[in-house]
Amino acid sequence: MEYTTCCVVGGGPAGMMVALLLARAGVDVTVLEKHPDFLRDFRGDTVHPSTLRLLDELGLGSRFAELPAGRLERMRVHINGTPVVMADFSRLPAPYDYIAMVPQGDFLDLLAEEAAGEPTFTLRRPVTVTGLLTSGEGDSPRVHGVRYRSQDGTEHELRAALVLACDGRDSVAREAAGLRPHEFDVPMDVWQVRLPLPPDDSRGIVVGHFRAGGAAVSMDRGTYSQVAYLIPRGSDAQRRALGLDAFRAHLSELLGWSDDVVGAIRSWDDIPLLRVRMNRLRRWYRPGLLCLGDAAHAMSPVGGVGVNLAIADAVAAARLLAPALRERGTVTTAELARVQRRRMPATLVTQRTQHGEHEMLLRPALDGTLTKVPTPLRAVGRSALLQTVTAHLGGKGLYRERPPVFARRVSVPPRP
Ligand SMILES: Cc1cc2nc3c(=O)[nH]c(=O)nc-3n(C[C@H](O)[C@H](O)[C@H](O)COP(=O)(O)OP(=O)(O)OC[C@H]3O[C@@H](n4cnc5c(N)ncnc54)[C@H](O)[C@@H]3O)c2cc1C
């Protein structure tokens, strides 16, 4: 039977980053990914200052700077027409003073190419993990590896000292381990829309538009605008039944963009639905298995934090687990618990902040009761200091995950 020290289920941001770092530590690591490539449209593409700094520390900054990227320096919202600056990233110390908007597929290709240079790294795709190899009864069976299906339909087993469940918000590995996340109530789902850049002053800015009866957020992607149009949770079919013309008209009114710009929407097929979920595991691990990223905690899209938290989880896991995997070839359950203890506060605070924004702004906009600028936002809008604080918390997070020494590479000059 095949064996690897660490089996990573899923090659998303969490899986590829933890695999790269473990491989740099000399740990034998195998990633199993169900898709044949990393092409992803409209996933989390927001690379925050914390991740930009990490990439420099890993020696990947100059390659990352070559990827096609939009650059976001501020977040402004219009609440019933009143503009409020919510966060000013350009006030953070350079060069980590903006959010890069990079297609997630390009970012993952970069991590995969870099990891491929390490002799202990293997990426297998397309293969689908279907279950776990376990022993023992009761609540906490020990995990010894995974079952997976290759493209020709044949079933395989891969034994491992540690399985990292990085297979996202519908994690099969998590389910097979009997771990169930607690789901939080969210007010919205999201339609993702790609539009031409409007001739206005929104270059380099995230602009939110909130008013009684509607909410949308537009992001400058350099060559186009990505618009997240919020709909009440579970109302996708009902809203689509109102017709495309009604949608275009509402979007045009909400954003203040011309009919020409929103006329670029040709069919409902252009508008994928993101079913928003916000959840969190109470316990992220079983003996022999640890969940990271969305598998441990699906985030609301508010603030575009999903990718960055997934990467921070990966860095913490590699830093805390690589020494044991390298020296003993195994990890204890107590060591897995340390990773959860390290990452839980950041997850908790971020989800509470997102919940606060849902209730203060998003829900009232969607249910038609938003009448004025909420007081805390009014205060932020009036204070450059508070706009720096919100940029710091949003862009850098509650605390920094430093890359382990074994993973660092020669630093690169700061990007211009
Ligand atoms: C449709 C969609 C749109 C999103 N839009 C936004 C957004 O606008 N802003 C934002 O901040 N966040 C967004 N997110 C969330 C963001 O993409 C995630 O938070 C982030 O990618 C989490 O990284 P991850 O590595 O934990 O999981 P994921 O990125 O979900 O990666 C999981 C990986 O596991 C693989 N996989 C799954 N099951 C198996 C299996 N059984 N066997 C093998 N491989 C498997 C998947 O193919 C995938 O590559 C979106 C997510 C989705 C699903």
Image: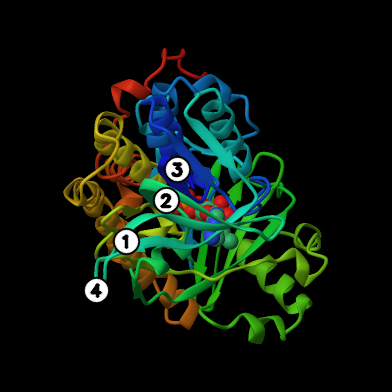
Which quarter of the picture shows residue 414? top left
SS class, disc 4: loop
Task: Report the Cα–Cα distance between label 3 and label 1.
Answer: 37 Å
Amino acid type for the residue under numbered disc 1 = Gln
Q: Position of residue 272 (x, y in %)?
A: 67, 66
Q: Nearer the viewer, mark 2 or mark 3?
A: 3
Q: Position of residue 80 (x, y in %)?
A: 49, 68
SS class, disc 2: loop
Task: Report the Cα–Cα distance between label 4 and label 2.
Answer: 36 Å
Q: Which residue is mark 2?
A: 305
Amino acid type for the residue under numbered disc 4 = Gly
**Circles 4 and 1: CB distance less than 8 Å?**
no
- Residue at the location (46% across, 14% down)? 412
Q: Nearer the viewer, mark 3 or mark 4?
A: 3
Q: Nearer the viewer, residue 349 or 342?
A: 342
Q: Nearer the viewer, mark 3 or mark 1?
A: 3
Q: Which residue is mark 3?
A: 3
Task: Report the Cα–Cα distance between label 2 and label 3.
Answer: 34 Å
Q: Is residue 85 visible?
A: no
Of labels 2 and 3, earlier in sequence is: 3
SS class, disc 1: helix
**Circles 2 and 3: CB distance less than 8 Å?**
no
Amino acid type for the residue under numbered disc 3 = Tyr
Amino acid type for the residue under numbered disc 2 = Val
The 10 Å Cα crowd at callout 2, few under 14, some 14 to 19, many 20 or more, is many
- On whether ligand 1 comes within 8 Å of the CB at mark 2, the answer is yes
In the depicted structure, whether residue 397 falls above or below residue 298:
above
Q: Position of residue 182 (x, y in %)?
A: 32, 73
SS class, disc 3: strand
In the depicted structure, whether residue 184 falls above or below residue 343:
below
